Image (cartoon, grey):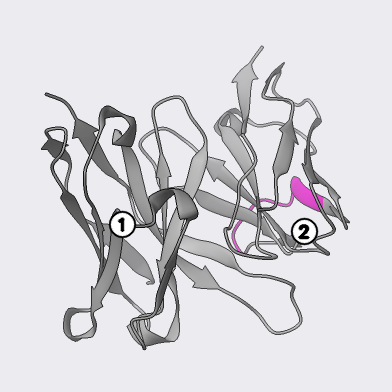
């Protein structure tokens, strides 16, 4: 079945960087965009950016530009999200999600999502 | 950016109740709205896409409606497994913004 499996929880110090992986299986990796979303404790969902696995093209939310790097390795069907200059405000669960669209339906949606990776930033 | 204003932020309901959650977009987005269910320690799950299409495998008690700027998610008869947080999301343009979420709690 279609599945996204993320790397395990991380604890980082302020100012450090974190790199989260998202391993895709059950479909052709290069046929679907991957998006990244995070949820801070007690907060809502925040869209971070996307990567087009076929081309490597990316886009990210303005609030993360300059700090987030989205990459992929097509040989192992894995996408990566690296966030630098971490602060306590970056403590959150980070999700990857595949983008799906259907002919005749407006827009696109995220399905499935990875299980989430908790990143804790603490001194 | 398109703002998605979701209400209420939380609600208490009993098993069997009809529950309605609304989302208003800051501009006309056609039918480009999705609804997700989020439970603690679990991956978010899409329930409704393109405003009113039921995702495969999702129970038919969930339904979505609306177009333009006003959208609704309805649970016709709340079940114990439906206690969760629900988010709307617009896919009309990047950034793919979400509503603030609605936490559905047991009364």
User: Looking at the picture, does residue A106 appear above or below residue B101?
Assistant: below
Residue at 17 percent across and 41 percent down: it is A9
A54 lies left or right of B92: left
Where residue A102 appears, as percent x and y from the top left, is 65, 80
Q: Are marks 2 and 1 in contact (CB under 8 Å)?
A: no
Q: Is residue B68 magenta?
A: no
Q: Residues within 10 Å of mark 1 (few under 14, many from 20)?
A: many
Q: Chain of mark 1?
A: A
- Tell which tag, 2 or 1, sits nearer the viewer: 1
Q: CA distance from mark 2 to mark 1?
A: 31 Å
Work out whether residue A117 or residue A38 is closer to the camera in this orientation and state it: A38
Residue that label 2 marks: B51
Q: Which residues are magenta?
A: B56-64
Name which residue lies at 35% across and 36% down: B41
Image coordinates for residue B99, horizontal then vertical, percent = 65, 41
Label 2: how many residues lie within 10 Å, few (<14), some (14-19) or many (20+)?
Answer: many
Q: Which mark is residue A68?
A: 1
Which secondary structure lies at badge 2? Answer: loop
Residue at the front extreme? A66
Q: Can residue A7 be seen by looking at this rendering? A: no
Determine whether the residue tagged by mark 1 lies in a helix, strand or loop.
strand
| Dot 2: chain letter | B
């Amino acid at each position: 079945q279609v599945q996204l499996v993320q790397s395990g929880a991380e604890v980082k110090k302020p100012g450090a960087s974190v790199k989260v992986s998202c391993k895709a299986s059950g479909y052709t990796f290069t046929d679907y965009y991957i998006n990244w979303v995070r949820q801070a404790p007690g907060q809502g969902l925040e869209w971070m950016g996307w990567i087009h696995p076929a081309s490597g093209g990316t886009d990210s939310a303005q609030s993360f530009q300059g700090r987030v790097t989205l990459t992929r390795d097509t040989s192992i069907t894995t996408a990566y999200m690296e966030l630098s200059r971490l602060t306590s405000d970056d403590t959150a669960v980070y999700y990857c999600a595949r983008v799906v669209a259907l002919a005749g339906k407006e827009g696109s949606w995220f399905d499935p999502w990875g299980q989430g990776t908790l990143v804790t930033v603490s001194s | 950016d398109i703002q998605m204003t979701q209400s209420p932020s939380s609600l208490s309901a009993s098993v069997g109740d009809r529950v309605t959650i609304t989302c208003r977009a800051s501009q006309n987005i056609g039918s480009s709205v999705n609804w997700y269910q989020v439970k603690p320690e679990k991956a978010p799950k899409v329930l409704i896409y393109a405003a009113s299409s039921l995702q495969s495998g999702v129970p038919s008690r969930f339904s979505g409606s609306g177009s333009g700027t006003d959208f609704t998610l309805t649970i016709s008869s709340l079940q114990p497994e439906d206690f969760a947080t629900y988010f709307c999301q617009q896919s009309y343009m990047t950034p793919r913004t979400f509503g603030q979420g609605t936490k559905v709690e047991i009364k």
